[in-house]
Structures are given as structure tokens and as C-alpha cells.
Image: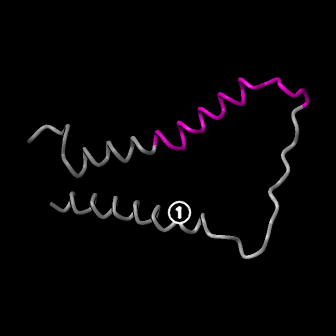
Amino acid sequence: MIGRLVWAVLFGAIFAWEGIGLPIMRRRPARPWSPARRPTPARPGKGWAAAFARQVLGTALGGYVPLMAVAVGYYRGVARLGIPAS
């Protein structure tokens, strides 16, 4: 019983943190700013494969892996699925 309560509080805290963070990220800055300039590649048009791989890897590590960790944690911790009955 206590284990489920801990998991429920943990997931509630995670979703509350995300719910608070999104409006903060979307608010307008207090003073105007200009985005940083990116250095141009030495040879335009080359190296797209490395940039694409970096984008795919960043998306997987930054989005898919945490999402799966939350889903598996929920089903194992809160719903108690996949754990043999003792």
C-alpha cells in the first residue's frame, strides 16, 4: 500500500513539474533578445548525415527513453503489472 502511494506521489510530482515548466518556458522575456548566431559549416551541404544522426539520437535520448521509463515505472510500480504474485 505504501509503495503505491510513493509511486503515485512521485508521478504526480513529475507531471506537476512539467505542468509548471511549460508555461514558464512559453512566457515572454522581460527584455528583447536576439538569438545566438550559429557558426556556418566549412563546406555547406556536407555533413548532413552526422547532423541527422545527432538529431535522431538526441530525440531518442531526450524524449523516447524518459517516456518509456515513466510508462514502465507506472506499470511496474503503480499498476503492479509484470511482477509475479508472492
Q: Is the C terminus in the top left, top right, bottom left or bottom right quadrant? A: top left
From which residue to which does the magenta span run? 42-65
Residue beneath the point at 25% across and 44% down: 76
Q: Residue furthest bottom?
A: 30
Q: Which residue is mark 1?
A: 22
Q: Position of residue 23 (x, y in %)?
A: 54, 67
Please determine whether, in this image, residue 2 is positioned above or below residue 53: below
Quadrant of the image occupied by residue 85 = top left
Q: Is the N terminus in the top left, top right, bottom left or bottom right quadrant? A: bottom left
Q: Nearer the viewer, residue 3 or 33?
A: 33
Q: Position of residue 46 (x, y in %)?
A: 82, 23
Residue beneath the point at 64% across and 35% down: 55
Mark 1 burial class by Cα count in 10 Å: few <14, some 14-19, many 20+: few
- Residue 55 is left or right of residue 36, and the answer is left
Secondary structure found at label 1 = helix
- Residue 64 is left or right of residue 12, and the answer is right
- Could you tell me the amino acid type at mark 1? Leu
Residue beneath the point at 84% across and 46% down: 38
Please determine whether, in this image, residue 3 is positioned above or below residue 74: below
